Image: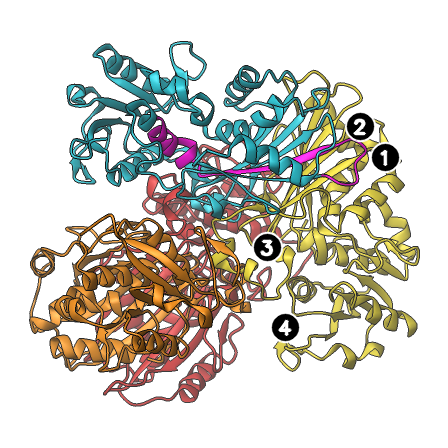
Chain colours: A orange, B red, C yellow, D cyan
Amino acid sequence: MNINSPVPVGVFGASGYVGQELLRLLAGHPGASLVFATAESAAGERVEGLRLVRADDAPLDRAEVVLSALPHGISGRYVQEARAVGKRAVDLSADFRLSPDAVYGLTEVARPRVARAELVANPGCYPTAALLALIPLAQCGLIDESREVVIDAASGVTGAGRNPTRELLFGEVAEDFRAYAVGNEHRHLPELRATLARESGFAGDLVFTPHLLPVKRGILETIHVPLSRVLDQATAEGIYETVYADEPCVRVLHGALPSLKDVVYRNRVALGVAAVGNVRRPRLTVIAAIDNLVKGAAGQAIQNMNVMLGLPETLGLTC
Amino acid sequence: MNINSPVPVGVFGASGYVGQELLRLLAGHPGASLVFATAESAAGERVEGLRLVRADDAPLDRAEVVLSALPHGISGRYVQEARAVGKRAVDLSADFRLSPDAVYGLTEVARPRVARAELVANPGCYPTAALLALIPLAQCGLIDESREVVIDAASGVTGAGRNPTRELLFGEVAEDFRAYAVGNEHRHLPELRATLARESGFAGDLVFTPHLLPVKRGILETIHVPLSRVLDQATAEGIYETVYADEPCVRVLHGALPSLKDVVYRNRVALGVAAVGNVRRPRLTVIAAIDNLVKGAAGQAIQNMNVMLGLPETLGLTC
Amino acid sequence: MNINSPVPVGVFGASGYVGQELLRLLAGHPGASLVFATAESAAGERVEGLRLVRADDAPLDRAEVVLSALPHGISGRYVQEARAVGKRAVDLSADFRLSPDAVYGLTEVARPRVARAELVANPGCYPTAALLALIPLAQCGLIDESREVVIDAASGVTGAGRNPTRELLFGEVAEDFRAYAVGNEHRHLPELRATLARESGFAGDLVFTPHLLPVKRGILETIHVPLSRVLDQATAEGIYETVYADEPCVRVLHGALPSLKDVVYRNRVALGVAAVGNVRRPRLTVIAAIDNLVKGAAGQAIQNMNVMLGLPETLGLTC
Amino acid sequence: MNINSPVPVGVFGASGYVGQELLRLLAGHPGASLVFATAESAAGERVEGLRLVRADDAPLDRAEVVLSALPHGISGRYVQEARAVGKRAVDLSADFRLSPDAVYGLTEVARPRVARAELVANPGCYPTAALLALIPLAQCGLIDESREVVIDAASGVTGAGRNPTRELLFGEVAEDFRAYAVGNEHRHLPELRATLARESGFAGDLVFTPHLLPVKRGILETIHVPLSRVLDQATAEGIYETVYADEPCVRVLHGALPSLKDVVYRNRVALGVAAVGNVRRPRLTVIAAIDNLVKGAAGQAIQNMNVMLGLPETLGLTC
């Protein structure tokens, strides 16, 4: 890496929570230089020393790589424009996550493909945690596919975006907790299911229920795994430890379970397991925690960008 | 009820969160008069117009009914003393919940027994919500006992008591979320399992995982029920509606799911259901919410006391 | 009071935080019966057993008293309509607070006038706390008017209303704290200044700075009073104790200072004082706390309504 | 700076909130290498790759610089020991803040002295914000010393330390707000008064009232300044802008006021001003915000360490 010539990076959609996090992380990234950042109603304002421009006015030619945190349905268009003029891109929206034109950028699983990719679809926040928790077990054939995998996930409110709606007001969310998209209705589920099948051959059923937490950032997923054979805690930890031995952004806990404070402001998934007692058939509970804005969005996008550019994978990131 | 002669009530253990809630509710109860309240380190202080005394100094003879919110292991002794001098008692600790000497006071299920009881063991907060959600389905034989019922529960911190420990400091809990007692290790589980079997004949397995929420009060339980036959949302709502038609403290939602704000400061369980899509075998997700300090503790104790005394069941309570 | 014939009450503006609190309090009020409640976008929904109607469709004839929590600028019109058909009214907006046509309803100060009033302008939340703290000192000539009275006030977010704006999102307010309307720009200031002058003759300067707290409800005001002569803590407490001896909704603390938890969900102002050391001229710091939705709005409105109707002043209220 | 040979640094008191923040910042500091970190009950645990040792077992000889976040009264002894064997030290406790043996390390004011210091007393969190706000005005003679400067400060709970006490439990602090040490009783006041006098000659009176905020980190101070002559907002901003033109860790806002979100996780003080209207004599309100754990403690300690070692002043810090 030639630290004297940082890579010029452009950011679409810089005024939402994910976009702000991209700017924060890029400001501390020694190998990248922010050349434009877009916003619509906030266009003209200065952020991190740069004046925000409208997406239609983005000076694409100045960037070598483009990161887009625009909303689903809008992002795809601007990413295509960037691709059309030869720019490599990481799209943080859902627009390309199920598309064969993009590499699905769960870095730990797709690193070689990401390195060669022109377009990376950055994974959703919930799938990132669930996939890193489930793929090792599924790949080893340890999940009993005749019983459902039940995932209860809870996310901080920045996961719901920054558009003002009554249900996201402090007066509604503080001291509250609720489930939403109950009954397998969440839009992340097809992405989760498809990726898990592709990477591990898993063919069982999933029940995924997200909840809204009264915190700003962080996701905790409590993943109930029916096992095809008995696994004690140490053995299960050993499996994760082996699979993720060389991964800088995965932390396997031993004899402990992660909570949000282990992961916020870090580009890390933390994993812990417990064998379930007092049941007739073997079960494992896996707890996975990430910061929805970092490993669940902006941080993983930069991790992917680093891999694409041949930079050290965690440059500019705290893991 | 003769409103001119309120029943004299004594409270053991008035300085914890449950004890404080008992005093708050009794202060607004038109049919009860607080005659003593005990505390140890806070003995001598005045609360709600009464001077706190040490438990050993409680003037038992002045009370007709005794409510105890003392810690597990300590409560039983003082309740026995009160019983020995002929006082009726509601014990909010776990000391008698599995004992044949007490009536397990899940009011909606045990009302006639509570009415005649000399000693009521007030249910735990987590079991209260789970039992009111599961008993109707189990009684109807709707649960497929070959698959596990998975319960993910989240509680506000007042459920963990008021003794100062580092892990309950604001600086640790705020912006955090974590699971605990993972792997079926929670001490409420035997109570839940035994009561569910007794009241409904349920013989399947449960997986119960509590979590600590950064809120002061409230419990939300997301209960994943494998079904023995398909139930759509309206039918499932109808079952609950029928079972709880005359229950003042149970609220069944229609086409909606409860959150903590529906129940805090109320002696109410709120229930909502959703059928689960995209799975091969039928499943229902039930969401149950209570205020851990009210329907999960002090409120239900007063509901039971009202039943014992022949007072209107919800006197002094907001349902 | 004839408890068998509750007074029929109508509520304008029932969907905001203050309106919701009015409905909550009226639901537990044994001397009042809610006959209509209005909302615009939520018209048609059922709340507390009543179907919300649009303000223009309010059946005014059914009510004996009308309470309006409509926004400033809109409320006045509907209150005038109610007055035109002979209904007594309490307006919780600012529309009549400086008007000679209404009695300014700081109950403790204006009780006899409120009792005879056809129209009561319910005080703003910030002025309620500040006035009850300052009037006793000002009436006794204890404030040195050559130096400014400095009031730093902090309010929970329900004080800012329930309309969705970005700055009130949980993601913006949680873990934040900020001043607003700095430099004596708050719209409550003329009301505070005029009332203080009218009730006590105070002619000094005020500096009032509100802040937004990351809590749902509650106001704490730290009031810095330059004194015309030395007052120690006990003497200052004695002054308040004397002035408010018979007031059910004012609580004077001794040797302690109030915090929000002393007042939330209560129709109470709590007051505490401390003499200031290490300064050359005498000063007193007064801390005043209220629940902005109760004594600062809906509770005081019901307190005023009770006075207007000759009901016990605190009926339906917890003080 | 020779980036290939980072300076060996030892940390006393690594288990409290300030100590944890020191470790977090040092972990990302390219010019420093942590050689020991002490804790008492947590001795033996691994943090950031290092095993914690008891303070009495600290291998002082391995360090070139020592940072101490031990409690007041204990820190001084260990810092003296380090000094006795020739180690330079930054003491984050109050033990040397009023001592002639140490340089008071408000970096922006004392930079040349810090550069030469063997022992730096790191300022308290509240004084850091207040001094950077008041010194420029006092040095220009703009404060009317015949009237008191009133400072209302609010701090997140990490400022109160990590020892478990009931009053710092989540169940007590959440949804609460309270003043403490009211009446000029806070132990930071002598430090604030002495430094302000020394650096600016200010001889007026201060009234300082701290409050406890339900947030994890951050301090906001609302500083009410009586002026000796009229200053409009732009002029006041210009004064700060001029004084702090070259300061990397001071941010002067224009036409806006800072809130906690502008400063958390940053080694920055943010300053904003507003002229006060509707008063007879000129007044300015200054709002100062810092992160109590960063610019108010660990960050400023590292800023000072950098200056002592001749490293770039903000190395390892986000300003």
The residue identified by callout 1 is C202
- Figure quadrant of residue C294: bottom right
Task: Provide the residue span drawn in magenta.
Answer: D276-304
**Residues under labels 4 and 1: Cα distance?**
44 Å
Residue D250 pos. (x, y %): 48, 36
In the rendered image, which residue does mark 4 sit on? C48
Q: Chain of mark 1?
A: C
**Mark carried by residue C157:** 3
Q: Amino acid at mark 3?
A: Val
Q: Is residue B151 visible?
A: no
Do the residues bearing badges 2 and 4 touch, measured as CB atoms within 8 Å? no
Q: Residue A210, which numbered label?
A: none
Task: From the image, tell me which residue sits under label 2.
Answer: C143
Q: Earlier in the sequence, mark 3 or mark 4?
A: 4
Kind of residue at badge 2: Ile
Image depth: mark 2 or mark 4 in front:
2
Q: Is residue B37 above or below residue A238?
A: above
